[in-house]
Image (spheres, grey):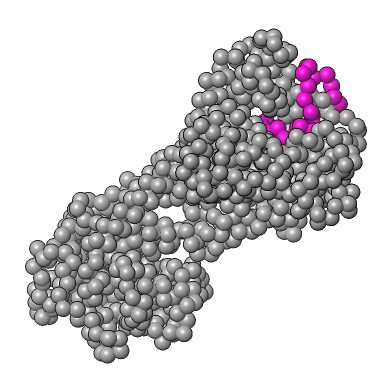
Amino acid sequence: MSGRLRMQKEEDGAAEQTPRQAPPLTKPAVPSYQPAGKEMENEISRDSELYSQSAVRRRSRKFRSRLAYCLCALSTVIAMVPLVLILFYVIYQGAGDLNLSFLTSLPKPVGESGGGMGNAIAGSLILIGIAAVIGVPLGVLAGTQLAEYRNPRLSCVVRLLSDILSGVPSIIVGIFVYTLLVLTFKQFSAIAGGVALGILMLPTVARTTEEMMRMVPDTLREASLALGIPRWRTITSVIIKTAGGGIMTGVMLATARIAGETAPLLFTALGSRTWPTGLDKPIASLPVQIYQFAISPFDEWHRQAWAGSLVLVLIVLFLSIGSKIFFGRKMKRAS
Amino acid sequence: MRRRLGDSIFAFVVFLAAFAVIALMALMVYELLRQSLPSIEQFGARFLISREWDPVNNVYGALPYIYGTIVSSLLALLMAVPLSLGIAIFLSQFAPRWLRSPLGLLVDLLAAIPSVVYGLWGIFVLAPFLGKTIEPFLADHLGSIPVFRGPVYGVGLFAASVVLAIMITPTISAISREAMLNVSRDQKEAAQALGATPWETVRMSVLPLARPGIIGAVILGLGRALGETMAVTMLIGNVRQLNASIFAPAYSIASVIANEFAEVTEGPHMAALVEMALILLFITLLLNLLARLLVQRTGNRAARLKGRPFAKNRP
Amino acid sequence: MAGYIATNNLGASFGGVQAIENITFEIPANKVTAIIGPSGCGKSTFLRCLTRMHELVPGARISGEVVWDGKNIYASEMDATEVRRGIGMVFQKPNPFPLMSVADNVSAGLRLAAGRMSKARIAEIVERSLKLAALWDEVRNKLHKPGGSLSGGQQQRLCIARALAVQPDVILMDEPCSALDPASTQKIEDTIDKLKKSYTFVIVTHNMQQAARVSDFSGFMLSQEMGEPGRMIEYGPTNKIFTTPERKETENYITGRFG
């Protein structure tokens, strides 16, 4: 067939073929460019200058592209360095002092060896619990409003505000709760700390709930409504159940975020050297304890701070890696 | 009838929850405003430019704190932005596909590490390291510029900025990466078909279209840096001064609040601290608003470019 | 002429799915060659293989050879960016750089390839390319407006001007008019007709009237079944393909029995 094509070409008197071995990019040596305007449309020629610089230019462009690639890869590597270093130091400095008694006993006064952060770990769990009791239902309900009740004006404002709320520095939330609860009841308390953390949880939970509910196909809603199930039952039993796994990852993510929060607890939960005694009393927490020990002048306390950090980092990494893997799987299944 | 009642009750509860978000923000602004009113009334604009901070005579000026906050955050941006853009470009354009999400996850983990752990690491590892190596090097070679003049302490503005840079890198890189991924393939092919190298493709097609998203990411990073408390408090040195050298200890708004707030209960001192929180709140609100709008704009534009631009001509 | 391209046993796949297979084909210089066939037969993939665009798709694999200017463009010493500059491409959906000005759009490839060039020289080539693409009269006063502000038909001609400005040997067009109105289509066809003295064109189209109007040679591609790789069934001078095709499948397609 190709023979026929060639014959056809010869019949047409088409341009003769240049020998195939012709070196690449050799152009007519004489620049045959003609000034614009003058019979331009009939005679279209190649500009030799476009090719003359080509070899050098090509190499420099290639080099720049490689350089950019290397710099970008290097940036990524550089970002890994602190991650690796922090994990290394937390394990290296903290693992030695981490044992069962660290997890279960009270801190010892300066000068005595041993002791632990049992009260701080218990306190953190209590605080996270209070935060979840406040933040999760409120966040899930607000997310439901965004996803299921399409009230454009309200949704727009709520969405924007919850995004902004997630950018508000956590210490400001601490001050807010201080003026709201601590000043009013004249008492630092676990409740106040929990409320502050709950407020910080709210936007993450609300937005993931919204996203997850939007992924529930409309057919499911329609099917349920068609069965005569009222809308609120449809939402609470069908939709929240279907989106439940995804909402859980949002809660985990939010928990990971607040588990390490220190600043909002400084003047709400305050801190304590004893076991938690009541929700209306100041309460210890892991991050605050780490902070106080870290800035103290005592070596034993520094070691305790490292061990506490190891516990905290393990909790936070477990929560955030877990939720990310879970979330990734969720997204993949939905798409 | 019962059914409709159930529906309206549930709708009302859900509405209440959504409204709570709005109420919460409003209440927050109101409370801070109310508590800082004495300070606003007493000091007015002088509060922002005075460097006096005297709890005994109740005279307060926030300038050193504002200075420390802004300088440490801008220094952090200076380091974090190029790094984050490199990461975003690498993870959205250059890296082999199988490597992208594990690397992305690792960068995200930087954001998961609690601030107080950064602070601990900063005090005992980073600051001594900076104080022994990089800071003396810069002071020796660039010391004629006041910014790099010694003495070096390790702990100070520079150390705080380095930790801030590490902390905001995941935020900036993740959001700009998202913006870059939003640039559609045919926009990149436009450059590639002209013989653009991979880097030229990024410069011609990806960066211009992702620019609002990238700027939004940088602003969000700035907002995060301005409000970051623990790591900065532990590393900035907590000395109330205006010193041109970035190696000198300084103070920031968030750190003075963290250090002093628990000890005061009322009066002008507390009002002054709350007023600083209010300033910080307003700045971060504005920055966040701006950033969200910009990030949204990239998303919209990407959506527009992905759809056919002139649907009306289609058969 | 350097506008001559031959493929030798070309095959391409993505994600493990073979899109085209065993295509041995010749594209004569300074002619318009149309690639026709039903949708899903791998026409676009074939076209993209001719200028090393297919390999940019994740999971893409290519086998066989594409010989251009006496060299296999897939040979290891060949530079893909150099191939893409010599063999330009215009896409189905107009894709000007939306934020760049019209003039900068046209000179974008030029500025990459040629390094330092005087502003006047660039302006000259921009003007010439826009004239060749029959767009100059419409945009001469809008050269500083962003490329995204033009109409769809204008955007596509802007893309043609942009491809012309780097002075390639070959211009590949992937259904360049499928998203355009008849008036714009007419203008683009006129442009092709005018330029074919100096450029080699390869046009993928599923508009058979268009193939008949603009092309000198045609190749008919078909994948025998859904999911089967596309092959080149028949090729030859357009008038022969359209009047007396040798293969039954070609005739069926031309006469509109399927596709």
Residue found at the far front of this picture:
B144
Q: Where is A39 relative to A230, above or below?
A: below
Identify the magenta region. A254-281
Q: Can residue A280 be found in the magenta stretch?
A: yes
Position of residue A194 in the picture relative to residue C140 (left or right): right
In this orientation, does residue B187 appear? yes
Question: Residue extending furthest bottom?
Answer: A38
Decide which of C26, A298 is in the foreground and name it.
A298
Q: Is residue C161 or residue B307 the one in the foreground?
A: C161
Rendering quarter of residue C22: bottom left
Magenta stretch holds residue B83: no
Q: Which residue: 58% across, 29% down? A: B121
Above/below status of A148 relative to C39: above
Residue C245: % across, % down: 19, 71
**Figure check: B222 above or below C104:** above
> Does residue B118 appear in the picture of this structure?
no
Q: Describe residue A276's horizontal placement relative to residue B147 as left or right.
A: right
**Residue at (27, 86) in percent of width and height:** A35
Q: Residue at x 18, y 66 (%)?
A: A25
Who is closer to the viewer here, B174 or A97? A97
Residue C198, picture quadrant: bottom left
User: Horizontal and vertical percent for residue A54?
Assistant: 24, 65
Residue at (57% x, 34% y) in the render: B154
Q: How many labels does the image show?
A: 0
In percent of width and height, residue B151 lies at 57, 38
